[in-house]
C-alpha cells in the first residue's frame, strides 16, 4: 500500500471496500486495523462510516437500566431532584438522559405532597413485599424433605380441617374431601397414596358455577390430579343467582375438586384415631413458668 508525501493513504476507496467487507464478516475495529494495517483512528472511522458494529463487540452498559428508568420517571412528571432521590445517580447524568423530553408541568404544593406521599408508600410497600417473600423463602427451605410419619401427621390435620366428618346423628364414615386449592388437593392425594389407596378407588368430581368455563376447569383439575377428564364423574353446576354479587369471576376461578374414596370406613376410623393421637401427643404449656 502506498502513502502520499502528505501522509495519507493513496487508494481510499479500495481500502474502504476491504474494511467494509471485513466489518460485515463480523470483525472488530482492532481486527480490521491489523488486517489492513491502518493505524490512524480518524481514517479507520472514515473507512467504517455507516457500518454498524457486530453485536459481539458491544459491551453492556451498567447504566442502561438507570437510563431507561430515569426517562420513565421524567415522563411521569418527576423533577431532576426527585429522580436523583429515586435512582441514586447524579443530576448531570439525569440531565443527559432526559434532556430531549418535555419538562413536566408545575404542580400545586398539594399535588406535589400527594405524589411524594404516594411514592413513599410505593417504596414502603415494595420493601414489605420483599420482606414477605424472604420470610416465605426461608420457611420453605426450613421444611426440607417430609418423612412418611410427617406426611401422615400433615395429611391427617389437613383432612380434619377440610374433609367430611362423621357425626353421631349422621354416620358418614368415609373419606370425602373437597377444596379449591390445587396444592391442597395434591398434598391430600399424596397422603392417600401413603395410606395405600389406589387410584381406582378414588372418585373425582368438579363443583363449579354454571357461568364459568366448565371445560377449562375440568382440564385444570385433571392435570392437578394426574388423571384423564373422562375419569371424572359428571360435573356439579351451581345455579346462577342474579341477586348475588359473585367475586369469583376471574380467569383463575376453577371451582373445586371433590375426591371421594370408596370402601373407606376403616380408613376414616384410622384417620380420626390418628387425629386424636396428634392432639393427645401435643405437649401442654408449662403453666408454672407462665407469667
Image: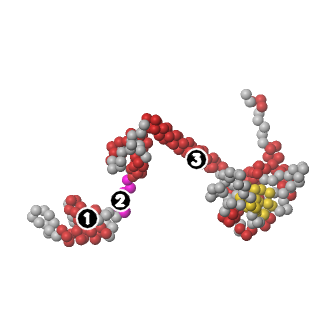
* Residue found at x 40% / y 51%: 68
Is residue 229 highlighted in magenta?
no
| Residue furthest top as drawn | 291
How far apart are the two marked residues, 1 and 3, measured between alpha carbons? 51 Å
- Can residue 149 be seen by looking at this rendering? no
Q: Which sits in the foreground, 44 or 234?
A: 234
Residue 211, image x, y percentages: 68, 60
Q: Is residue 251 above or below residue 229?
A: above
Mark 1 falls on what kind of element? loop
On the picture, is 100 further left or further right than 196?
left
How many C-alpha atoms fall within 10 Å of the one at disc 3: few (<14), some, or many (≥20)?
few
Q: Which sits in the foreground, 60 or 112?
A: 112
Is residue 59 highlighted in magenta?
yes
Dot 3 corresponds to which residue?
133
Q: Which sits in the foreground, 95 or 163?
A: 95
- What range is drawn magenta here? 55-61
How many C-alpha atoms fall within 10 Å of the one at disc 2: few (<14), some, or many (≥20)?
few
Q: Quadrant of the N terminus?
A: bottom left
Q: Earlier in the sequence, mark 1 or mark 3?
A: 1
On the picture, is 142 further left or further right than 10?
right
Q: Earlier in the sequence, mark 2 or mark 3?
A: 2
Q: Which of the 4 image quarters holds residue 219?
A: bottom right
Dot 1 corresponds to which residue?
48
Residue 168, image x, y percentages: 89, 49
Q: Earlier in the sequence, mark 2 or mark 1?
A: 1
Q: Which of the 4 image quarters holds residue 172?
A: bottom right
Amino acid at each position: 500500500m502506498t502513502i502520499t508525501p502528505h501522509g495519507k493513504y493513496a487508494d481510499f476507496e479500495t481500502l474502504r471496500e476491504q474494511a467494509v467487507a471485513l466489518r460485515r464478516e463480523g470483525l472488530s475495529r482492532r481486527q480490521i486495523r491489523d488486517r489492513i494495517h491502518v493505524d490512524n483512528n480518524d481514517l479507520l472511522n472514515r473507512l467504517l462510516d455507516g457500518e454498524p458494529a457486530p453485536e459481539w463487540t458491544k459491551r453492556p452498559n451498567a447504566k442502561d437500566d438507570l437510563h431507561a428508568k430515569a426517562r420513565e420517571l421524567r415522563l411521569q412528571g418527576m423533577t431532576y431532584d426527585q429522580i436523583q432521590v429515586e435512582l441514586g445517580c447524579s443530576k448531570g447524568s439525569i440531565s443527559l438522559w432526559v434532556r430531549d423530553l418535555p419538562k413536566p408541568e408545575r404542580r400545586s404544593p398539594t399535588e406535589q405532597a400527594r405524589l411524594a406521599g404516594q411514592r413513599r408508600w410505593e417504596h414502603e410497600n415494595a420493601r414489605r413485599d420483599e420482606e414477605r417473600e424472604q420470610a416465605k423463602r426461608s420457611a420453605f427451605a426450613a421444611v426440607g424433605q417430609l418423612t412418611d410419619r410427617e406426611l401422615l401427621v400433615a395429611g391427617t390435620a389437613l383432612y380434619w380441617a377440610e374433609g367430611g366428618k362423621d357425626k353421631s346423628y349422621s354416620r358418614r364414615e368415609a373419606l370425602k374431601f373437597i377444596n379449591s386449592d390445587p396444592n391442597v388437593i395434591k398434598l391430600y392425594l399424596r397422603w392417600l397414596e401413603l395410606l395405600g389407596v389406589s387410584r381406582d378407588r378414588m372418585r373425582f368430581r368438579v363443583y363449579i358455577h354454571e357461568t364459568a368455563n366448565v371445560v377449562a376447569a375440568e382440564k385444570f383439575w385433571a392435570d392437578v390430579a394426574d388423571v384423564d377428564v373422562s375419569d371424572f364423574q359428571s360435573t356439579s353446576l351451581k345455579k346462577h343467582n342474579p341477586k348475588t354479587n359473585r367475586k369469583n369471576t376471574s380467569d383463575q376461578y376453577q371451582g373445586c375438586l371433590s375426591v371421594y374414596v370408596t370402601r373407606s370406613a376403616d380408613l376414616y376410623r384410622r384417620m380420626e384415631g390418628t387425629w386424636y393421637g396428634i392432639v393427645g401427643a401435643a405437649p401442654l404449656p408449662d403453666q408454672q413458668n407462665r407469667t
